[in-house]
Image: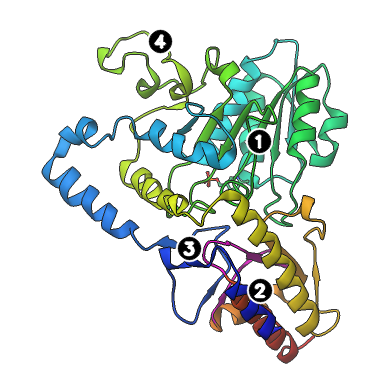
Amino acid sequence: MAARARHLDDTDALAPARELFTLNDGVVYLDGNSLGALPAHVPGRIGDVITRQWGELGIRSWGESGWWTAPERVGDRIAPLVGAERGTVVVADSTSVNVFKALVAGTRLVGEERDEILVDATTFPTDGYIAQSAARLTGKRLVAVEPADVAARVGPRTAVALVNHVDFRTGRLHDLPGTTRAVRAAGAIAVWDLCHSAGALPVGLGEHGVDLAVGCTYKFLNGGPGSPAFLYVAPRHQGVFDSPLPGWNSHADPFAMAPAYAAADGVLRGRVGTPDILSLLAADAALDVWDHEAVSIGAVRAKSLALTDFFLECVEAYAPAGRVASITPAAHAQRGSQVALRCSRAPAVMEALIARGVVGDLRRPDILRFGFTPLYVGFADAERAARVLAGVLAEGPA
Ligand SMILES: *Cc1c(COP(=O)(O)O)cnc(C)c1O
């Protein structure tokens, strides 16, 4: 397996991208699905934002350094990574907040008679909590549905369906084209949470006719801890998108300081208040890695599947029989960019892995999660992770 790993690394077209990141010697970082690694040039860029743009130019930077328009400008850089056209993505606030905007605005895009919101029954918790509150505020009934059943369940009473593109626990990739088609055919609004797919695989928001979407920039887009999230509004909805959080930043004339709200044109209707410039510009700088000639979302997807296949093969070859079981789908069409292994004593096993330089994470009670980020994780890393895991499993009490 080790020789094969070396061969795969030697022939890896994405290998040069690794040089763009600051990686710690001796550590295999398999947690980029939670917090992406640091691109090496980001500290210098943020240093400039702080010392020159803020320190020297001060308030002039809102115009001269492009701070005011950064949410749309950075959105336009994310757009091609999720298959969206220019002017459809804005970067602002957290994913949680954007889920709220999308859900409530989604209900306002359809008729009052539609009285239910469908929510992914396996969703990342924050989406579920926000959907509950959005349902209470809008007077709709919240119905939890397995993602695979949304297409069959959606109907004339559905206002909005909110689905996670990739399950954060199992790494299962859901059917975005088919589900979106069914939701739209029923006259409802499809809202996708792309936290675990943006920057990991082709999404095709425009091609598949998605209505609204949200996603993280600090996972596969490496924007840094707490970097702001993005909101996608399909062009056909932009003229009527009615945000439940209409702040002065989404006003048609913010500096008129008018008492009455009038929404701006376009996706900047998704903005609320003053952008968090330091985090936003860290995410902006991090997106430069996508400008490297070897880097494309197609290349990332191809390597991601090869890496997760190879890791599973190594686990199968090395781990004591019966100690771990993958709950990540074997079929490529149903796999995101992580491998989740069910394992007894998972907390102690993950602790031992981290102590030995293999950084994954734990989803209680019994899931070991390994994120594969093709820009900076290689095949030798996957082989080593599986080998160290096997060693930990072999030593521990059953
Ligand atoms: C990571 C993640 C979030 C995080 O939301 P925050 O508001 O950034 O904390 C939301 N949804 C999904 C599906 C996620 O994976």
Ligand 1 is within 8 Å of the C-beta of the residue at disc 1: no
Q: Which residue is mark 2?
A: 347
Q: Are marks 3 and 4 in contact (CB under 8 Å)?
A: no
Of label 3 and label 1, which has the lower sequence position? 3
| Residue 83: x %, y % from top left | 59, 36
| Residue 138: x %, y % from top left | 64, 19
Quarter of the view holding residue 169? bottom right
- In this picture, is 115 found above or below 163? above
Q: What amino acid is found at the position of numbered circle 3 in the picture?
A: Ala
Q: Which residue is mark 3?
A: 17
Residue lying at 27% horizontally and 34% vertically, measured from the top left = 66
Residue lying at 65% horizontally and 41% vertically, measured from the top left = 203
Q: Which residue is mark 4?
A: 262
| Residue 358: x %, y % from top left | 58, 77
Q: Comparing marks 4 and 2, which lies closer to the viewer?
A: 4
Numbered mark located on residue 192 in the image:
1
Q: Are marks 3 and 1 in contact (CB under 8 Å)?
A: no
Q: Residues within 10 Å of mark 2 (few under 14, many from 20)?
A: some
Magenta highlight on residue 118: no
In the image, the segment drawn in magenta is 357-377
Q: Residues within 10 Å of mark 1 (few under 14, many from 20)?
A: many
Q: Comparing marks 3 and 4, which lies closer to the viewer?
A: 3
Q: Residues within 10 Å of mark 4 (few under 14, many from 20)?
A: some
As rendered, which of 10 and 61 lies closer to the eye? 10
Label 1: which secondary element: strand
Label 2 to label 3, Cα distance in Å?
A: 32 Å
